[in-house]
Image: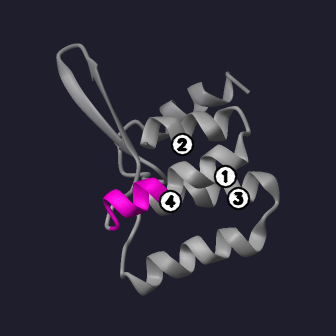
Amino acid sequence: WKCFLSGCWTHKNFELGEIAGEELRRLDPEDTAGYVLPFNLYTQAGKWEEAAEMMKLMNERMLKKELSCSWIREKGKIHRFIVGDKHHPQTHEIYEKLKEFD
């Protein structure tokens, strides 16, 4: 259901996305993806009340979204990047390189 829901977001299929979100929450009510992915879908559609409801449900169930991270291996060394983290020793160089893509 997660992949399907992500596809709904990509293709802006809000109706099927709502169904997928409901199924995901029914199958695993503690999986934050069942709230975060519909939240993203609702905000994309400008459905702010529905988006707020997803956050409300997460808060009521005391669920917290885990931080996103990426891992890469470079020259045999593994680097982990967490969204918003500035503690990597090469943070400045990394962000300068990313600016080249804009």
Mark 2–mark 3 Cα distance, whole angstroms, equals 12 Å
Please tell me which of labels 2 and 3 falls first in the chain: 2
Q: Residue at x 38, y 81 (%)?
A: 61
Q: Nearer the viewer, residue 94 or 73?
A: 73
Please tell me which of labels 2 and 4 falls first in the chain: 2
Q: Residues within 10 Å of mark 4 (few under 14, many from 20)?
A: some
The secondary element bearing badge 1 is classed as helix
The secondary element bearing badge 2 is classed as helix
Q: Nearer the viewer, mark 2 or mark 4?
A: 4
Q: Which mark is residue 22?
A: 4
The amino acid type found where label 3 is placed reads Tyr
The residue carrying mark 1 is 41
The residue carrying mark 2 is 5
The amino acid type found where label 2 is placed reads Leu
Q: Residue at x 70, y 49 (%)?
A: 15
Mark 2–mark 1 Cα distance, whole angstroms, equals 9 Å
The residue carrying mark 3 is 42
Instruction: Pinpoint residue 84: horizontal percent, then vertical percent.
Output: 49, 54
Apparent side of residue 17 relative to residue 92 in the rendered image (left or right): right
Please tell me which of labels 2 and 1 falls first in the chain: 2
Q: Residue at x 40, y 36 (%)?
A: 90
CB within 8 Å, label 3 to label 1: yes
The secondary element bearing badge 4 is classed as helix
Q: Which residues are magenta?
A: 22-29
Q: Nearer the viewer, residue 80 or 1?
A: 1
From where the camera sits, is residue 100 visible? yes
Instruction: Pinpoint residue 52: horizontal percent, then vertical percent.
Output: 66, 75
